[in-house]
Image (cartoon, rainbow, N blue to C red):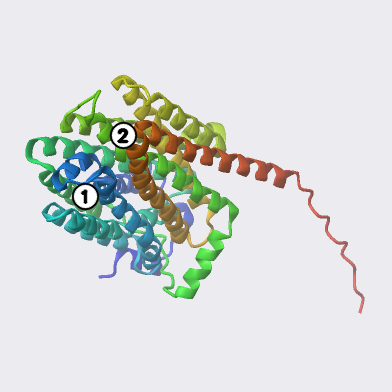
Amino acid sequence: MPSADTEASTHPVDADSRLTPGLPGYRRMSLALFAAGVATFALLYSTQALLPAVSASFGATASAASWTVSAATGALALCVLPLSAFSERLGRSRMMSASLAVAVAVGLLVPLAPSLEWLVVLRAVQGAALAGLPASAMAYLAEEVRPRALVGAIGLFVAGNSIGGMSGRILTGWVAQLWGWRAALAAVGVLAAVCAVAFRLLLPRARHFTPGSLDPRALGRTVRTHLSDPLLLRLYAIGALFMTVFGAVYTVIGYRLVQAPFSLPQGVVGSIFLVYLVGTVSSAAAGKLVGRVGRRGALYLAVGTTAAGLLLSLADSLASVLGGLVLITAGFFAGHAVASSSVSRTARTGRAQASALYQSAYYVGSSAGGTLGAVAFHAGGWAGTVLLGLVAVLGVVSITLYGTHAARAEARRPVAPRSPVRTVRA
């Protein structure tokens, strides 16, 4: 029996049959990719809330333990482009299913790591396996969902990311407090396995996928085309910088909260990640926000919200820290949803590669944020981490302002008059 993607290539359908809210397959698609998003973030950041416990178990510093997060996100960043190329040939559904299956299998081995070095290696393998999912999911949505519904559909996928990040951290926090960090990682593996099964059962058959070539030269040309597009380059940089802030804050926050003046237990620290629910709301609402203030306006709001959260979190008050995390999370997820959906709309060809490049930049930002955030915390405490975040936010502002200026200059540029048509007589 041919796969869903193979069938799509032999039975083309009209573009009007693409999914949109109200059609039967749209809800199944949304739930399937929501489950995939939950599994992806729960696995990818499974050690983040456990870093203080991992440090204590192996006698490691914060910067050394942070590599259990950075190795996973860094491997994902390296592998997302080649795996997205395979998805052009094998199909989005196959690639996403295989990625989840391998990542879940590795996730069940991670709790058995005998040393910090082995834990980092297994996490890197897990991140590489997950690389087949994000870009393939974005390309699947761009192909199967009508353009007007695309921002909302991607927002729901990103919302699944936020739920996965939240539930994984809360689960690991409380399980670690009761039975240790190894049991906590095993629990995340089981959660991801349930999500992977739900994804496979719910995802509708792809109807608009056409297999592409695995020719490396063609891939290189597509990548060069995307990297020569100024708008796409700006979107990639914005995604990386937003994720640098987010990666730095959430890698270090556990260390801050277990220390004085807060001295919170591991389970309570894990529950702090309930603020991810704010990200679920802000990412799902990104489409409406863009409709009201435009894409650049939405980015400015996301940047302002993130910066305000960083500054508020400086106070030695638990309420201020929580309020700061709420603002940082809301700003990040809104900015990410707007930037990632803009990539899908901007790329006319090679959408999987365009999304893959965005994901590479995004997770490079995560890896850099996690490592640099831990180094900044070691050097200057929480204020050092906040300073790093504000520098990244300033970068987003500069890029967005430049894009606004470039768009206005382009609009003012006069259109060259056409040459008069001369009639040539025989």
- Residue at 20% over, 35% down: 170
Front-most of 41 and 264?
264
Work out whether 271 lies above or below 348.
Answer: above
Q: Quadrant of residue 56?
A: top left
- Report whether 119 appears left or right of 144: left
- Residue at 38% over, 51% down: 363
Task: Please indicate, yes or no, whether residue 157 appears anywhere in the rendered image.
Answer: no
The earlier-in-sequence mark between 2 and 1 is 1
Quadrant assignment for the N terminus = bottom left
Horizontal and vertical percent for residue 414?
Answer: 79, 48
Q: Amino acid at mark 1?
A: Ala
Front-most of 64 and 324?
64
Task: Please indicate, yes or no, whether residue 194 appears anywhere in the rendered image.
Answer: yes
Characterize the local packing of mark 1: few (<14), some (14-19) or many (20 or more) Cα atoms within 10 angstroms: some
Q: Quadrant of residue 166?
A: top left
Q: Amino acid at mark 2?
A: Tyr
Q: Mark 2–mark 1 contact, CB under 8 Å?
A: no
Horizontal and vertical percent for residue 421?
Answer: 87, 64
Q: Quadrant of residue 122?
A: bottom left
The secondary element bearing badge 1 is classed as: helix
- Residue at 20% over, 26% down: 263
Residue under numbered circle 2:
276
Work out whether 389 lies above or below 415.
Answer: above
**Which mark identifies residue 198?**
1
- Report whether 292 appears left or right of 268: right
